[in-house]
Image (tube, rainbow, N blue to C red):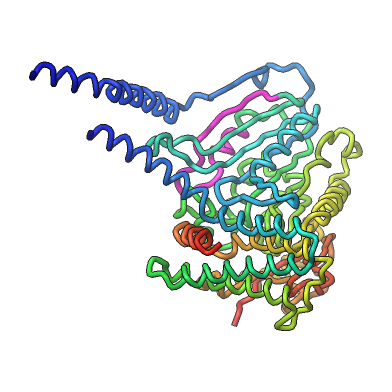
Amino acid sequence: MQSSHNLTFTSATQPYSMLLAGFGGVVLVLFLVSCSSIPLMQRGTPPGEESALPPRYSMAFIIHGDGDYLYHDPQGNARRADQEAFLEATTVAERNPQAQVFIFHEIRRKHALLIFPRRDGKFYYYRHGQLLAQESYWRDQGQSRFDPEVTLYHRFRAGEQPQPLRLFFYFGHEIPEFGGAGYDASYSQRTFTVLDLADGLKRIAPDSSRFDLIVLSTCFNGTPYTIAALAPYARTIVASPDNLHLSYFDLQPFERLDVGLRDGDMAGFAKIFARQTFDRLTEDIQTAVTVAVYDVDSVQGYLHAVDSVYYHTLNTLKGQTPGSIKHCDCADDPVYVLPGMSEGVEVFYRPSRFGRLKQKQNHSGWECWMLLN
Amino acid sequence: MLTRTVFGVIVMMFVLVQAANAGGNDGIQKYFNDTASKVKATADPAEKRAILDKSLQTMSKALDKVQSSPLISKEDRAGIDQFKAALQENQDELRGSNGYQRVPDAQLNAFSDYVVQNMEQADRSITISLVAALLIVIIIILLV
């Protein structure tokens, strides 16, 4: 009887034992995968072994996806802004036979079986339209930002003689000017501000040379502070001073730079891009659409003139709750309305079709902060 | 029995975490997107207006209920206040009250898109915790 009981017990638990054994196997594999530092995939010709001419264009994309990036298109389809931006960036990479393209996709940290952390960054390197390398990587776990991205950039970049036209793109939510905690959903305590981005750009830029174009596909970063922070690293900046819908800037103009940018006039090209992206956004978006092009050298006078007052405002805002401050057009605050305010700034603006600000007919191209009450 | 229970708990935790990650803010945005789809699906302007009005009212009620919950932090209450203020602006414009011109019948489809897009953008400036967002979604499901 005893024996029979044991036999029955063993038979009943056998599937669970096998299940647990299988579970253990999966755990082991996931553990090894999550901790390994070996590139997941590397295909094509390794960098440096290629006989093609050096790239004429060098583009770097940072696409932040570690947050809430859901939006709906006018047909009601749910879309993820970071995934859409990533697809557009890969199209740009594939259609530029004279470019090298770095794509960094910062994704939400996930755990295999709730325990084993998985890599939270994906890197893609294209040259001459071909995907040459693809790696998953760990983003910074501590305070510093972009260390892994800077390392990967320098590891893969092709010899830059003659120096290519260099472009940098950032896709994400508004890059904070102060505070900055909670920007990454996966790392709620970690802070990220415009100064962190500026530091990353400084370390990417070889020999302190400037990017020919920086595109900030974010909300509210067309401010005197943000432009001043990035100014040492850019000749031309395209950004939105106001809200920017998550459908973001349209990257289509960057496909075939060898055709669109044949004359090398990046400032002129930036304006064409801004116009085109503005036209595309205004087709579908009912909220305000504002795209500004900043000629960095020409806006220096205005930036110096408002630097101290803006900095003072930022210090005042640091202790305030989110509900007690809001963005506003700098032109709505008399202290920022100075001669030269519009010098070096080209603004494409259409007010919101509904809401309190639908009557606002123009925008200075500079966004500031307002303390409520 | 113990093995079965442990395995069940692991699976349940996995499902709950996934649901929580996807359910909060995404659920709120989906709610407004569903409203826009319903508005566009009908040709009658009065019906469009009624759908929008009811949708905004239901969300306001859900926010009131969540705000009065003891589970909600002070920060969440402030975030919900902002959220309610944004909804009230939408409702005022729809009805033509508080200094707003009433949204014309011909623009109700566009207005429904505006509500969706405005909420998607407000998502960054209005900070609500995952717990609060989940509670809002649950109450919305109960109210609808």
Where the N terminus of chain A falls, by quadrant?
A: top left
Residue under the image location 53 percent in, 46 percent down: A145
> Does residue A369 lie above or below A248 as drawn?
below
Left or right for A266, reference B75: right
Q: As displayed, is residue A95 above or below residue A336?
A: above
Q: In this view, does A240 lie above or below A261?
A: below
Residue A8 rendering spot, x and y as whole percentages: 19, 20
Residue B83 lies, in percent from the top left, at: 58, 69
Q: What stretch is highlighted in magenta?
A: A131-153
- Name which quarter of the figure residue B118 lies in: bottom right
Which quadrant holds residue A53?
top right
Q: Which residue is drawn at 77% across and 46% down?
A: A213
The answer to whether residue B55 is left or right of residue A244 is left
Residue lying furthest left in this view? A2
Q: In which quarter of the image is residue B33?
A: bottom right
Instruction: In this rendered view, identify the residue nearer to me: A204 or B141.
Output: B141
- A328, above or below A152, in the image: below
Quadrant where the C terminus of chain A is found in the figure: bottom right
The outermost residue toward the right is: A263
**Residue B5 position within the rendered picture, expressed as x and y whole percent measured from the top left:** 27, 37
Q: Is residue A151 part of the magenta span, yes or no? A: yes
Q: Can residue A7 be seen in this view?
A: yes
Residue that appears at 59% across and 45% down: A65
Instruction: Where is residue A210? Give x, y as percent.
Output: 73, 45
The magenta stretch spans residue A258: no
Taking depth in this image into account, of A61 and A11 the one nearest to the observer is: A11
Q: Can residue A308 be seen in this view?
A: no
Nearer-the-camera pick, B91 or A239: B91
